[in-house]
């Protein structure tokens, strides 16, 4: 993680710790005001500790150990009294324990020297403000997906078979809604290949899914194929114009809850793009993370452009949504 981005993440953690310290102080003041006896017990513990410390300085080891053991017993009794006072006044016994937002790392960002899940969540939230991963239409919602833009009379699809565009669009819309509704319990990483000619609503439908999941608190990267490969290329070859968060974005493409790769086939394709596409598709399949790919390319064109391996992953792990018909932009 690059320094400036790392610093931004750490500022979020610093803010959390500051807010939690203020909450601890507020609770302590509340207890002092409502339960005066609590402060008296606290003062008694402090006094005992100071007196004992002064006494054992001049004691021999064995005698000092007995004095420390006696102090521990007295403090345990007084601590139990504090808990009793809290409970008697309607407070939980841990009311004055340090407040932490993250129960795993206590808001440090690390557990056993490794990044905590909360740090990854903060990184994802910050990255989702990057314009490169917010390429979806902001107005894309399921209730704005209009079936009347699709003809209700048969047309020939890419295989020369007659299909009714409105039926295909309705089927795609139902799949998308079902996907969002079951996302929390989906353990298999359900994925979609949304394909069709230009202007048939592929990006809009993918955007409906992305916006719905973002509103439900999930991390989503909605990125055009051009920006996706451009980011990976800059990071891989450490170009001078590489953005400082390119490396973090490349990780985010792997780790986010949903990756939407929009307009696949519009980028400049070469061996690098084909290789990286396979790597990211395969890794997300292995991790059982959902991916949506939209493209003007049909399956034959996918094979010709990216190879058999990519075609195999799409056919084996992605559900197809076909959108056909007239360009919607020309109907507006």
Image (cartoon, helix red, strand yellow):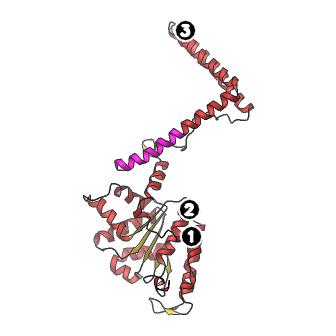
Residue where numbered disc 1 is placed: 179
The residues tagged by marks 2 and 3 sit, at their Cα atoms, a distance apart of 62 Å
- Counting residues from the start of the chain, the first of labels 2 and 3 encountered is 3
Q: Is residue 82 visible?
A: yes
Residue at figure coordinates x 69%, y 24% from the top left: 36
Disc 3 residue crowd, few under 14, some 14–19, many 20+, Cα 10 Å: few
In this rendered view, identify the residue nearer to me: 75 or 313: 75
Relative side of 192 to 233, left or right: right
Relative side of 266 to 328, left or right: left
Q: Position of residue 177 (x, y in %)?
A: 58, 72
Dot 3 falls on a residue whose secondary structure is helix
What is the span of residues highlighted in magenta in the rendered image? 1-19
Q: Position of residue 227 (x, y in %)?
A: 36, 67
Query: Marks 1 and 2: which is nearer the front?
Result: 2
The numbered mark at residue 55 is 3
Q: In the picture shown, does residue 47 fall above or below 13?
A: above
8 magenta-colored: yes
Disc 2 residue crowd, few under 14, some 14–19, many 20+, Cα 10 Å: few
Q: Residue furthest right?
A: 88
Dot 1 falls on a residue whose secondary structure is helix
Query: Where, by quadrant of the figure, is residue 88 drawn?
Result: top right
Residue at figure coordinates x 49%, y 42% from the top left: 15
C-beta proximity under 8 Å, tags 1 and 2: no
Residue at figure coordinates x 55%, y 8% from the top left: 55
Give the main secondary structure of the magenta stretch. Answer: helix
The residues tagged by marks 1 and 3 sit, at their Cα atoms, a distance apart of 70 Å
């Amino acid at each position: 993680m690059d320094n400036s981005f790392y610093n931004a993440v750490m500022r979020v953690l610093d803010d959390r710790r500051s807010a939690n310290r203020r909450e601890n102080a507020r609770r302590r003041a509340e207890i002092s005001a409502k339960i005066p006896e609590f402060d008296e017990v606290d003062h008694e513990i402090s006094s005992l500790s100071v007196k004992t410390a002064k006494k054992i300085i001049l004691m021999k080891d064995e005698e000092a150990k007995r004095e420390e053991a006696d102090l521990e017993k007295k403090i345990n009794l007084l601590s139990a009294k504090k808990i009793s006072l809290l409970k008697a006044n309607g407070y939980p016994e841990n009311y004055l324990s340090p407040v932490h937002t993250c129960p795993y790392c206590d808001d440090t960002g690390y557990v056993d020297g490794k990044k905590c899940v909360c740090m990854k969540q903060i990184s994802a939230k910050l990255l989702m403000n990057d314009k490169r991963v917010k390429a979806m239409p902001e107005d894309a919602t399921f209730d704005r997906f209009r079936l009347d833009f699709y003809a209700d009379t048969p047309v020939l699809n890419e295989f020369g078979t007659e299909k009714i565009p409105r039926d295909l669009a309705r089927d795609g819309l139902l799949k998308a809604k079902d996907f969002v509704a079951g996302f929390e319990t989906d353990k298999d990483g359900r994925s979609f290949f949304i394909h069709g000619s230009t202007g048939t609503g592929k990006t809009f439908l993918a955007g409906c899914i992305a916006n719905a999941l973002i509103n439900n608190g999930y991390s989503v990267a909605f990125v055009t194929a051009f920006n996706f490969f451009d980011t990976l290329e800059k990071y891989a070859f450490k170009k001078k114009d590489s953005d400082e968060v390119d490396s973090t974005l490349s990780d985010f493409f792997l780790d986010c809850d949903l990756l939407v790769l929009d307009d696949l086939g519009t980028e400049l394709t070469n061996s690098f793009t084909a290789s990286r596409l396979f790597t990211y598709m395969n890794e997300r399949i292995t991790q059982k993370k959902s991916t949506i790919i939209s493209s003007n390319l049909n399956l034959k064109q996918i094979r010709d452009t990216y190879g058999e391996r990519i075609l195999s992953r799409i056919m084996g792990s992605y559900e197809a949504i076909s959108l056909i018909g007239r360009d919607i932009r020309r109907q507006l």
